[in-house]
Amino acid sequence: MPEPRLQLLTREGCHLCATAEETLASLAAEAGLDPVTVDVDADPELRAEYGDRVPVVLLDGREHSYFTVDVPRLRRDLGLG
C-alpha cells in the first residue's frame, strides 16, 4: 500500500497539533487529499525521531514543516497556487 501523500504526526493533548490538524484538513480538502494523522507515541521510532517536535507535516513521506503548518509553502507544493 502506498504511503499517504499527507501525514500529520501528533500526540494526545497537544494544542499545536489540534490547530495543525484543522489547518491541514482544510488545505487537504482543497487539494482533494485525505490527510492521515499518526500518534508519535504509538510508535517508538517515530517518538524517538519526532517526539519533541510535534506537530510535524509529512508530504510524500518527507518532513515538510513542524510546530505549525507552513501554509504558503504547502499550498505551493500541493499545486494550489
Image: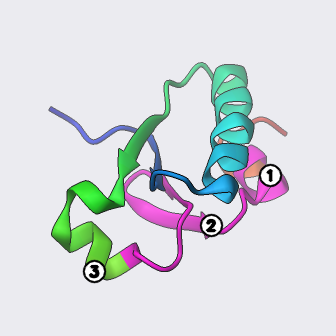
Upstream in sequence: badge 3 or badge 2: 3
Q: Nearer the viewer, residue 76 or 47?
A: 47
Upstream in sequence: badge 2 or badge 1: 2
Mark linked to residue 48: 3
Q: Which residues are magenta?
A: 50-75
| Residue 54 to residue 42: above or below | below
Q: Nearer the viewer, residue 52 or 32?
A: 52
Per the image, label 3 sits on a secondary structure element best described as: helix
Q: Which residue is mark 2?
A: 65
Task: Please give the name of the residue rendered at 62% of the width and 67% of the height, measured from the top-left corner.
Answer: 65
Assess whether mark 1 and mark 2 are in contact (beta carbons under 8 angstroms): no
Task: Please give the name of the residue rendered at 33% of the width and 80% of the height, measured from the top-left corner.
Answer: 49
Task: Please give the name of the residue rendered at 65% of the width and 30% of the height, measured from the top-left corner.
Answer: 25
Q: Label 3 is placed on what type of residue?
A: Ala
Task: Please give the name of the residue rendered at 60% of the width and 19% of the height, measured from the top-left corner.
Answer: 32
Per the image, label 1 sits on a secondary structure element best described as: helix
Left or right side of 30 for 54: left
